[in-house]
Image: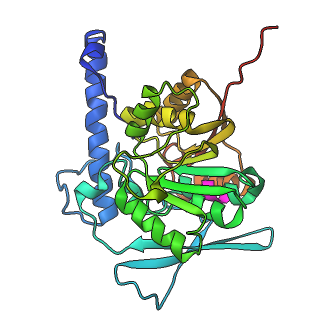
């Protein structure tokens, strides 16, 4: 689900046919978001003009069933519902309690990359969480950051609980998401070593560009933040991001934020479906910025097996929209001549 943002200078240098294609892409992306709003809110009366869904992404497929949610009864919380997400790996049980706000979201709240995570746990977040539980050594004794974790920050929360990191920071660009994640962190008794905060990639990237992005440590995620839990004074060994590649106009800011906050010997794990050229464009932008990149489809045997089963038996499953690819980003090392 991508749309191209073109400046006036760029438009002067573009062929008219390409401009027309870009305008068409933008219109399609807007229709996709309106359809997403209608589907997720379960309100067909929203945007009734949307009838042709054949060429628009519809979120019919919801889960690889790697972590199973079970609603918790008798929880004294009238504003939300609590679920236990659990999985068994090598005969060991892993579970965490996740909060979902009981609210009928408006279309304006649903449309946009800062808000879609408020509705559900996406397959990419599920797969990233499962992958990290299967490979707990990745985050052991590491300082971990999750960007764009949405309503649950499921991957980061499970890392904090089971992977023995040195520290975990969970972020999203939406205040509602971050407040909900704070509730999740508190309920799972992790508030003493897990930080939560609002991170908007454009602001973070602009701050990094202004400082020359020369390895200086960033003192604040958000200039308007007054909560000390929203501050950091270090770089991160591991940066996680799941299904955050929706929009072309956010691509370079996300790449810049990851590059500026990743330690020189750190690794970023980005999980997302291809969605046409969206994934590949992000990988190319990361390569251009100075990352070494590695794409992996067969990163876990169980995920791959589920993928093959869905291909055969679920006609609503579309790999281009639903199957997450793992992109690993590491900084290129400066080697001496010869």
Viewer can see residue 316: no
Residue 93: horizontal and vertical position, in percent? 72, 74
Seen as rendered, the residue at the extreme bottom is 74
Does residue 62 appear left or right of residue 324 in this picture?
left
Specify start and end residues of the magenta stretch as a single range: 126-130
Q: Quadrant of the C terminus?
A: top right
Does residue 87 appear left or right of residue 54 in this picture?
right
The residue depicted at 44 percent of the width and 27 percent of the height is 209
Report the number of discs: 0
Question: Is residue 243 or residue 33 the one in the foreground?
Answer: 243
Residue 90: horizontal and vertical position, in percent? 80, 68
Q: How is the image coloured?
A: rainbow
Question: Is residue 268 or residue 217 the one in the foreground?
Answer: 217
The residue depicted at 71 percent of the width and 19 percent of the height is 334
* 320 up-or-down from 146: above or below: above
Q: Is residue 328 magenta?
A: no
The residue depicted at 17 percent of the width and 56 percent of the height is 48
Residue 248: horizontal and vertical position, in percent? 39, 33
Does residue 255 appear left or right of residue 96 in this picture?
left
Residue 119: horizontal and vertical position, in percent? 39, 63
* 160 up-or-down from 57: above or below: below
Viewer can see residue 15: yes
Most frequent secondary structure within the magenta stretch: helix
Q: Quadrant of the N terminus?
A: top left
The residue depicted at 48 percent of the width and 62 percent of the height is 121
């Amino acid at each position: 689900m991508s749309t191209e943002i073109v400046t006036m200078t760029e438009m002067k240098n573009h062929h008219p046919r390409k401009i027309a294609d870009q305008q068409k892409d933008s219109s399609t992306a807007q229709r996709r978001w309106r359809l997403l709003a209608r589907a997720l809110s379960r309100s067909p009366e929203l945007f009734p003009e949307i009838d042709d869904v054949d060429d628009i992404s519809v979120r019919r497929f919801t889960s690889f069933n790697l972590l199973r949610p079970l609603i918790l009864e008798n929880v004294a919380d009238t504003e939300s519902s609590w679920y236990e997400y659990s999985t068994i790996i090598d005969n060991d049980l892993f579970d965490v309690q996740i909060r979902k706000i009981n609210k009928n979201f408006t279309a304006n709240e649903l449309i946009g990359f800062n808000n879609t995570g408020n509705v559900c746990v996406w397959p990419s977040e599920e797969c990233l969480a499962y992958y990290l539980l299967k490979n707990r050594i990745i985050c052991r004794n590491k300082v971990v950051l999750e960007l764009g974790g949405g309503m649950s920050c499921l991957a980061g929360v499970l890392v904090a609980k089971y992977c023995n990191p040195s520290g975990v920071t969970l972020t999203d660009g939406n205040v509602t998401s971050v407040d909900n994640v704070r509730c999740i962190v508190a309920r799972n008794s992790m508030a003493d070593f897990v930080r939560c905060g609002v991170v908007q990639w454009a602001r973070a990237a602009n701050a990094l560009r202004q400082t020359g992005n020369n390895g200086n440590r960033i003192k604040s995620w958000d200039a308007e933040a007054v909560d000390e839990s929203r501050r950091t004074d270090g770089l991160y060994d591991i940066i996680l991001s799941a299904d955050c590649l929706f929009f072309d106009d956010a691509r370079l800011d996300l790449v810049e934020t990851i590059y500026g906050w990743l330690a020189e010997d750190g690794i970023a794990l980005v999980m997302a479906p291809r969605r046409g050229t969206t994934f590949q464009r992000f990988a190319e932008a990361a390569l251009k910025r100075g990352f070494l990149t590695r794409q992996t489809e067969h990163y876990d045997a169980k995920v791959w097996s589920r993928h093959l089963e869905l291909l055969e038996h679920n006609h609503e499953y579309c790999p281009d929209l639903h199957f997450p690819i793992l992109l690993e980003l590491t900084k290129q090392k400066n080697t001496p001549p010869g």
